[in-house]
Image (cartoon, helix red, strand yellow):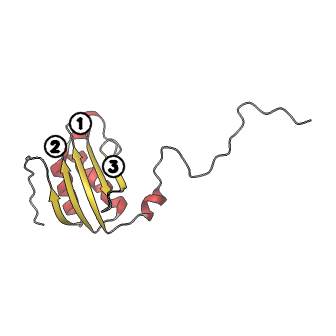
Amino acid sequence: MAPPPKIGSRKKVRIGLRRNARFSLWKSARRITKCVIHVQASFNNTIITVTDPQGRVVFWSSAGTCGFKSSRKASPYAGQRTAVDAIRTVGLQRAEVMVKGAGSGRGAALRAIAKSGVRLSCIRVPEPIPIVYPYEI
């Protein structure tokens, strides 16, 4: 006769597979040369999404995931750190930038993208809010 099953016994768990984790191996495997960088700067947060030319998301980062909390998420420094985090992880060469929103992190994020060595083919700003952009394309 078989022993009764233990209460709270271990389940089979695959190593390296977690539900809500982003994998460093998966991130480093997806190196692309051309991409579109979406900068969404609200009054509460700055979100940067890196997509391939077809629109599939390769990587995303926000000020909250970079460790900023509450009102510091909307600061220009948080936007800069978020942009650097997104570009460093993916490893880009050429990019288009789409800027959306009126938050204070959008100018700093754009400056960080330009300083990182990524060649910008165009910058699209749908809203009529000016950006102070000291670099030439």
Residue annotated with mark 1: 44
Q: Residue at x 56, y 52 (%)?
A: 16
Q: Quadrant of residue 65?
A: top left
In the displayed structure, would residue 136 be above or below residue 85? Answer: below
Dot 2 or dot 1, earlier in sequence:
1
Residue annotated with mark 3: 61
Q: How many marks?
A: 3
- Element type at marker 2? loop
Residue nearer the viewer, 75 or 20: 20
Q: Position of residue 123 (x, y in %)?
A: 16, 59
Distance from disc 3 to disc 1, alpha carbons, whole Å, reads 15 Å
Crowdedness of circle 2 by 10 Å Cα count: few (<14), some, many (20+)? many
Residue nearer the viewer, 85 or 123: 123
- Element type at marker 1? loop
In the picture, the disc for residue 104 is 2
Q: Amino acid at mark 2?
A: Ser
Taking the view exactly as shown, the residue that stands out farthest to the right is 1
Say left or right for 96 vs 6. Answer: left
Distance from disc 2 to disc 1, alpha carbons, whole Å, reads 9 Å
Say left or right for 56 vs 8. Answer: left
Q: Position of residue 106 (x, y in %)?
A: 18, 48
Dot 3 or dot 1, earlier in sequence:
1
In the displayed structure, would residue 38 be above or below residue 120? Answer: above
Q: Amino acid at mark 3?
A: Ser
Q: Position of residue 30 (x, y in %)?
A: 41, 63
In the displayed structure, would residue 95 be above or below residue 76? Answer: below
Q: Position of residue 21 (x, y in %)?
A: 48, 47
Q: Amino acid at mark 1?
A: Asn
